Image (cartoon, rainbow, N blue to C red):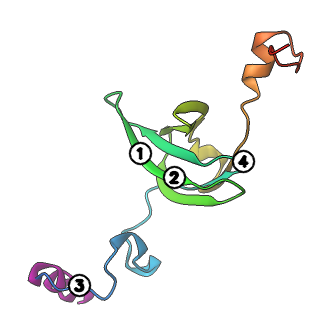
Amino acid sequence: GKTSVFSGYVLSGREAPKADPFFVEAEQKAPRDPMQVDATFVNMMEKDANLLWNAHDGSKMEVGSIKAGEASLGIQTFDAHVFDVQIEGKTVQVIKIDRTKGEEQKFEIRQSASSETEDNGGSTDKDEL
């Protein structure tokens, strides 16, 4: 079958026709995990953002960077996985995947709303006066 040819390429050290297994055609994938979510993160901010996955042991693994101005990053992830969105090293958003919201989901990275409401009762004035 196709897989033996593919692994033969890899073992021989030559480059396989489709070098990146993440982009193998859907038909060749294993049956879809019911907890899997195809997540797309769209950066609506004016600065580049980094996406980090919060591993179960508490460490954070960088998934990729998303350029400013509505660039997007698509990944396959799973229910209950948690991602930090960081801009200039500061976490601006924490996103938890919820499979009940669908198998394809889009997340827009914006200025976090929580920082405004918690600080000073909803007043949007900055404290720089």
- State the residue position of label 4: 46
Kind of residue indicated by mark 2: Ser
Kind of residue indicated by mark 1: Glu
Mark 1 vs 2: CB contact within 8 A: yes
Q: Which percent across, then down, holds residue 70?
A: 71, 57
- State the residue position of label 1: 62
In magenta stretch: residue 20: no
Mark 2 residue crowding within 10 angstroms, few (<14) / some (14–19) / many (20+):
some
- State the residue position of label 2: 65
Q: Nearer the viewer, mark 4 or mark 2?
A: 4
Measured along the vertical axis of the image, is residue 79 above or below residue 3? above
Magenta residues, dominant SS class: helix
Q: Quadrant of the C terminus?
A: top right
Q: Nearer the viewer, mark 4 or mark 1?
A: 4
Kind of residue indicated by mark 3: Glu
Q: Is residue 17 left or right of residue 4?
A: right
Res. 121 mark: none
- State the residue position of label 3: 15
Q: Which percent across, then down, holds residue 106?
A: 67, 53
Numbered disc 4: secondary structure: loop
Between discs 4 and 1, the one toward the N terminus: 4
Query: Viewer-proximal residue, 56 or 123?
Result: 123
Numbered disc 2: secondary structure: strand
Q: Which percent across, then down, holds residue 127?
A: 80, 13
Question: Magenta segment range?
Answer: 1-12
Mark 1 residue crowding within 10 angstroms, few (<14) / some (14–19) / many (20+):
few
In magenta stretch: residue 10: yes
Residue at 82 percent of width and 9 percent of height: 120
The quarter holding residue 88 reads top right
Q: Nearer the viewer, mark 3 or mark 4?
A: 4
Between discs 1 and 3, the one toward the N terminus: 3
